[in-house]
Amino acid sequence: MTGDDETDPADRRSSHGAPAVGSTIRDRFETHEVFQRIIVAADEEATTSDRELFFSGLAAGFAITVTFLLYASLTASTGGDPVLSALLYPLGFVYIVLGGYQLYTENTLPPVVLVLERLASVPRLLRIWGIVLLGNFAGGTIGGVVLATTGVLSPDAAVAATDIARKGIETSFGALFFKACFAGLIVAGVVWLDYAARETISRFVVVYVAFLAIPFGNLFHVVVSFTEVVYLVTAGQAALFDSLVGFVLPVLLGNTVGGVLLVTVVNYFQTTAERRELARGRTADRQLSTRDWLFGRSDDSYISGDDD
């Protein structure tokens, strides 16, 4: 027997030094595994009561106040430096993502996956979105009023907060929409990466860096924008209706479109049909009919995995 024949197969290597036999185990989730984790999380979310969704959204909306507060305060203390003033902008989002609160722009991914899989109806998706958005706006309202009336902001920070909010109001509808589309892509991407991460520190880094891109890119997030509007209206420096229609609405539409596009174009369809079947597990036999999927029924707008 030659020396080559006596070599352990596990030790054989190619001409480039890589193992010639065996398999490589990646220290990360495969695409279909991330997809499966999102389905499981969305399944839990879809069975959450309206009350829980609302109050989780309320907590998230109030947490966004921290983002606005720190952004305005650092803008004032750093003389408006575009980099230094944004360094603590992601903090509110870190609380939300790591704390598991419900934020509207995050809800453009997991529930949409259920709808694409025909496990939840379109009306149910809209209901989840509506409840979470209402909770976010309620929390943002509380935060905006507190910032405008309690002296939490220093005089310089209050001026900076006004300037930040006015910048959005003075931006055109079209520009707001497309800037918000990119922000929606970022947020939905954070959700996907969050489910792909294995450790808390990895999740923190992903969330921090991604949301730092929003102020760096002069982009807009709908809950932050709404909080800014409430601040201006409470301070008597803006009209509510005009600000909602001209500022919050285009940002809301842009965030939604950007988030949904990331799901449908980038993430959902990059998962091949074979891998989607693997990720679905036993869900294939509990899909909604076309009629129930599009229009929903009070008794059949969602088929939980517990129904098998």
Image (tube, rainbow, N blue to C red):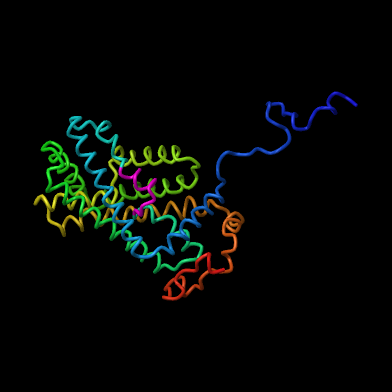
Q: Residue furthest top?
A: 3
Question: Would residue 262 appear left or right of 151 to someone viewing this image?
Answer: right
Q: Residue furthest left?
A: 236
Q: Pick whichever, 132 or 254, lies toward us.
A: 132
Question: Would residue 21 appear left or right of 300 to someone viewing this image?
Answer: right
Question: Would residue 224 appear left or right of 300 to someone viewing this image?
Answer: left
* Coordinates of residue 11 in the picture (x, y in percent): 74, 29
Question: Would residue 10 appear left or right of 150 to someone viewing this image?
Answer: right
Query: Looking at the rendering, which quadrant does residue 137 occupy?
Result: bottom left
* Coordinates of residue 119 in the picture (x, y in percent): 50, 66
* Coordinates of residue 305 in the picture (x, y in percent): 53, 64
34 in magenta: no
User: Residue, x 31% and y 42% (percent of image)?
Assistant: 214
Q: Pick whichever, 180 or 47, lies toward us.
A: 47
User: Residue, x 18% and y 46% (percent of image)?
Assistant: 165
Q: Is residue 288 above or below residue 165?
A: below
Q: Pick whichever, 251 or 102, lies toward us.
A: 102
99 in magenta: yes
Number of numbered callouts drawn: 0
Quadrant showing the N terminus = top right
* Coordinates of residue 210 in the picture (x, y in percent): 38, 40
Q: Is residue 205 above or below residue 118?
A: above
Query: Looking at the rendering, which quadrant does residue 156 occupy?
Result: top left
Q: Is residue 14 above or below residue 296?
A: above
Q: Is residue 13 above or below residue 41?
A: above
The boundaries of the magenta stretch are: 92-103
The dominant secondary structure in magenta is helix
Quadrant showing the C terminus = bottom right
